[in-house]
Image: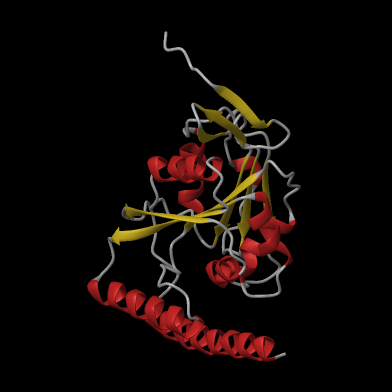
């Protein structure tokens, strides 16, 4: 058995726990309090697969899972879903009308009762993100990061879709004067403080990266390869993507102008 020499607990009142071992600071999480928000629009066949995937994650329990149904054609019924004992709380909320993914994520945050030891993960229900990627998000959050997000290096979408995404990400990032990131990625993790910032902000949730960057939250990113969708098709067609690009560009310009005016004052 290896003996640890020079162990010192720096702060036992907060999680993650900070230890000093032989002069080096190590961050160690005693408890994983993980909450998932799953935005869903016509993803019926993928929902149970996603719940099973979350249940397979290598942690003791899931604090809560909130599925936000964005007024899908077939209403999601909680009695039709199977959950393991590992999931402490499973809740389905339904938007009164189709309001978009950003609105659904905000709704999910508003329905969580978080403590300072809670982390939150946004996860798309299309089955394109692996158990390994989710576990890495949790690990990096438990190491003390406030905001963790993957970057998709390999994608199972047509070339024109990848070109559009790259152009969109570059354009919006340059307008906002932040490093280029993958705005469309459907897997992100947040600490309690970052989650509360997103819950209380008036800025559109699609700009979570911008919000947390200008507020200097500690960030960590890693590369992933995106898998094929489990079932169905993406709700974004070419027309939707063009409209989204126009709206995003105008909104980004509005944010940049507001930021400049704020600095002047």
Q: Is residue 107 rendered to the left or right of residue 134? A: right
Where's residue 11, x and y in %?
A: 68, 34
* Residue 111 in sight in this render: yes
* 42 and 178: which is toward the camera: 178
For residue 194, what is the image quadrant?
A: bottom right
At x 53%, y 67%, the residue is: 209
Q: Is residue 193 rendered to the left or right of residue 156? A: right
The quadrant of the image that shows the C terminus is bottom right
In this view, which residue lies farthest toward the top?
A: 1
At x 44%, y 78%, the residue is: 173
* 220 and 200: which is toward the camera: 220
* 117 and 71: which is toward the camera: 117
Q: Looking at the picture, does residue 82 appear above or below residue 238?
A: above
Where's residue 207, x and y in %?
A: 56, 72
At x 42%, y 8%, the residue is: 1
Q: Looking at the picture, does residue 140 appear above or below residue 226?
A: above
Q: Is residue 37 rendered to the left or right of residue 151? A: right
Where's residue 52, x and y in %?
A: 48, 37
At x 72%, y 50%, the residue is: 112
For residue 232, what is the image quadrant?
A: bottom left
> What color scheme is it?
secondary structure
Where's residue 149, x and y in %?
A: 46, 56
Q: Looking at the picture, does residue 206 appear above or below residue 109?
A: below
* 258 and 62: which is toward the camera: 258
* Residue 240 in sight in this render: no
Q: Is residue 164 rendered to the left or right of residue 87? A: left
């Amino acid at each position: 058995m290896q003996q640890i020499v020079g162990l010192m607990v720096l702060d036992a009142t907060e999680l993650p726990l900070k230890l000093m071992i032989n002069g080096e600071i190590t961050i160690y999480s005693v408890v994983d309090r993980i909450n998932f928000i799953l935005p869903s629009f016509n993803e019926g066949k993928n929902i149970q697969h996603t719940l099973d995937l979350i249940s397979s994650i290598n942690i003791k329990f899931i604090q809560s899972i909130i599925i936000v149904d964005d007024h899908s054609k077939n209403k999601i019924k909680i009695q039709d879903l199977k959950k393991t004992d590992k999931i402490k709380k499973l809740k389905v909320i339904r938007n009164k009308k189709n309001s978009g993914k950003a609105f659904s994520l905000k709704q999910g945050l508003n329905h969580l009762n978080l403590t300072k030891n809670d982390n939150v993960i946004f996860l798309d229900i299309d089955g394109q993100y692996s158990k390994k990627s989710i576990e890495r998000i949790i690990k990096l959050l438990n190491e003390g990061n406030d905001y963790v997000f993957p970057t998709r290096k390999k994608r199972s979408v047509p070339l024109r879709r990848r070109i559009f995404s790259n152009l969109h990400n570059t354009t919006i990032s340059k307008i906002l004067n932040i490093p280029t990131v993958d705005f469309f990625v459907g897997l992100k993790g947040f600490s309690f403080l970052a989650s509360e910032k997103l819950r209380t902000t008036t800025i559109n949730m699609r700009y979570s990266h911008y919000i947390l960057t200008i507020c200097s939250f500690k960030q960590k990113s890693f590369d992933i390869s995106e898998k094929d969708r489990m079932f169905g098709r993406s709700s974004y067609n070419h027309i939707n993507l063009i409209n989204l690009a126009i709206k995003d560009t105008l909104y980004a310009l509005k944010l940049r102008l507001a930021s400049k005016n704020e600095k002047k004052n």
